[in-house]
Image: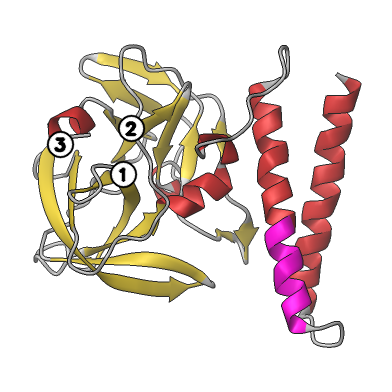
Amino acid sequence: MRHDDLRRSIVRVTDGTGTGTGFVVGPEAVLTCHHVVSGGNDITVAAGTESFAVTEMTLPPFRGGRPVFDLAVLHVAVPGLPAVVLDDSQPEPGDELQTFGFTDHYPEGDSALFIFEGTSIEHQESLLRLRSAQARPGLSGAPLLSSRTAKVVGVVSRTRGRDSDLGARAVPIELAFRLLPALAPGTPSRSEGEDPHLAALVAIHERNVRVLESQVAAYGPLNVPPHKQNELDHERAELVRLRSRIGGS
């Protein structure tokens, strides 16, 4: 995938209070940042002169009143726009990462070329640390295309200095696969007649249960923090509820 190809997959995202960027990752699936769509109820995506209303989203789990990572999948069809090629491998230090989004200074679109430095850790999740380009408001949700692999490896999430080229931090694509496992290569296709959104939710909670079970086991039976056990119990209960809906449909 080239930079020109990438631009054909990118959309403007608005929520009634502000504007950000998103990009097509699959049928009826646009990936963006959670904070881009958290401020209002009238969420739309725009491609050129056409605008499409968003009525359904897949959001990450919440902890302490905030999402554990800054992503959201908008379930909306954008005709004629191709999906990007995703890569959940981590970039290598020094990799060039290209992007394009709808910033406050250039609302019709602006490019940036970041350099990958390494990772930052927040809430036990990795973020990509980027330098050498400016991340203005509106660039949040933009895809990061690796010049080395020609695939999208991350999503711009926040600036490190909006008035300088200090850089940005980004969410790796691995977390997008956790949010919506159907995006990952090799995911089995769903059964005919099965609700795709319900199946996606089941896959999300199955993944969350596996991750939390691994974390709980690492603490040992006598040292598990109550909040971590509560998270696991909640995910298990939600998984049972969703599976019952599939079984009863």
Q: Secondary structure at mark 3?
A: helix
Mark 1 and mark 2 residues within 8 Å of each other at the beta carbon:
yes
Residue 3 circle label = 3
Q: Quadrant of residue 240?
A: top right
Q: Secondary structure at mark 2?
A: loop
With 85 as the anchor, is 211 left or right in this view? Answer: right
Q: Is residue 147 visible?
A: yes
Q: Percent position (x, y) of residue 11?
A: 28, 29
With 117 as the anchor, is 57 left or right in this view? Answer: right
Of marks 3 and 2, which one's residue comes earlier in the chain? 3
Mark 2 is surrounded, within 10 Å at the Cα level, by few (under 14), some (14 to 19) or many (20 or more) other residues, namely many
Q: Secondary structure at mark 1?
A: strand
Q: Percent position (x, y) of residue 29?
A: 46, 28
The secondary structure that most of the magenta stretch takes on is helix
Q: Amino acid at mark 3?
A: His
Mark 3 and mark 2 residues within 8 Å of each other at the beta carbon:
no
What residue lies at 76% left-to-right and 65% top-to-bottom? 213
Which residue is denoted by mark 1 in the rendering? 152
